[in-house]
Amino acid sequence: MGRSYEVRKLSMAKTAGQKSKVYSKYGKQLYVMAKSGGASPESNPSLQALIEKAKRDQVPSHVIEKALEKASGVGGEDYAPARYEGFGPGNTSFIVDCLTDNNNRTITDVRNCFTKTGSKLGAPGSVAHLFDHLTVLSFKGDNGDEVLEALLSADVDVTDVETEDGYVTVFAPASEFNNAKSALLAAFPNVALEAQEITFVPQTRVDVPEDDRPMFEKFLLMLNDCEDVQDVYHNGVLP
């Protein structure tokens, strides 16, 4: 596909901020995932993947356990997903995913981030077509061709496999997450996945002009400081 997927850099950017903020965001995601699909990781593969991701980001066990216990109870918060799209400093494109129990609060907070950085909040669909919604699996290795052959043999719909800087990265449609992961681990049981997620990957990247970089970085920080913002995706590239 002719692009370099910066797995570690992207993961850090998506969970930027103080540890307490990261723990809060994971707690909310785990609660919603367990509430909708069951609090048992064994019967909820998506929850299991999120727990593994939380552990890699050093979320304490008690935070994870508390979210699962809360989801197992009766009642609780009623969170709903909300997605906002728009244009950031330096002609960049942004997708902002939220979980909210108060839509008015969330849209106000997100709109303020756009307004205070000279950015423009767009209509639904104004930016999403510039990204691919993909499963991404990445691990240390140099056997990309062998990985591709194994996945195709397991009837996985593979979009691309890249080998770069000592890492193999598998791209597949978002709907293929469980199939791709299962097939990969079946063929290579000793693989340690450093990234396993469904994410938005930009089709093209934009170098942020030097004059726009301070505002671009401020925009990212403001978004990540919002209580309801869970993930921020963009196509900007900083040196």
Image (tube, rainbow, N blue to C red):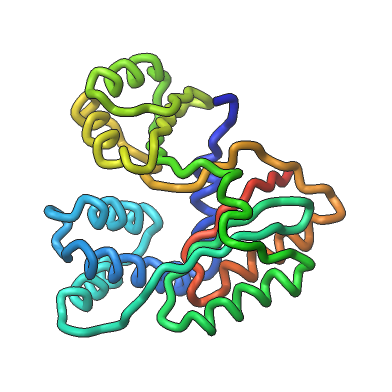
* x 36%, y 52%: residue: 56
Q: Nearer the viewer, residue 224 or 19?
A: 224
Q: Residue 25: image x %, image y %?
A: 42, 69
* x 37%, y 27%: residue: 158
Query: Is 175 situated left or right of 18 in this image?
Result: left
Q: Residue 215: image x %, image y %?
A: 77, 63
Q: Residue furthest right?
A: 211
Q: Nearer the viewer, residue 16 or 219?
A: 219
Q: Nearer the viewer, residue 87 or 208?
A: 87
Query: Is residue 208 in view from this perspective?
Result: yes
* x 72%, y 58%: residue: 88
Figure quadrant of the C terminus: top right
Query: Is 191 situated left or right of 218 in this image?
Result: left
* x 16%, y 83%: residue: 74
Q: Residue 169: image x %, image y %?
A: 43, 31
Above or below, 61 against 227 in this view is: above
Query: Is residue 190 in view from this perspective?
Result: no
Above or below, 231 against 177 in this view is: below
Above or below, 128 against 182 in this view is: below
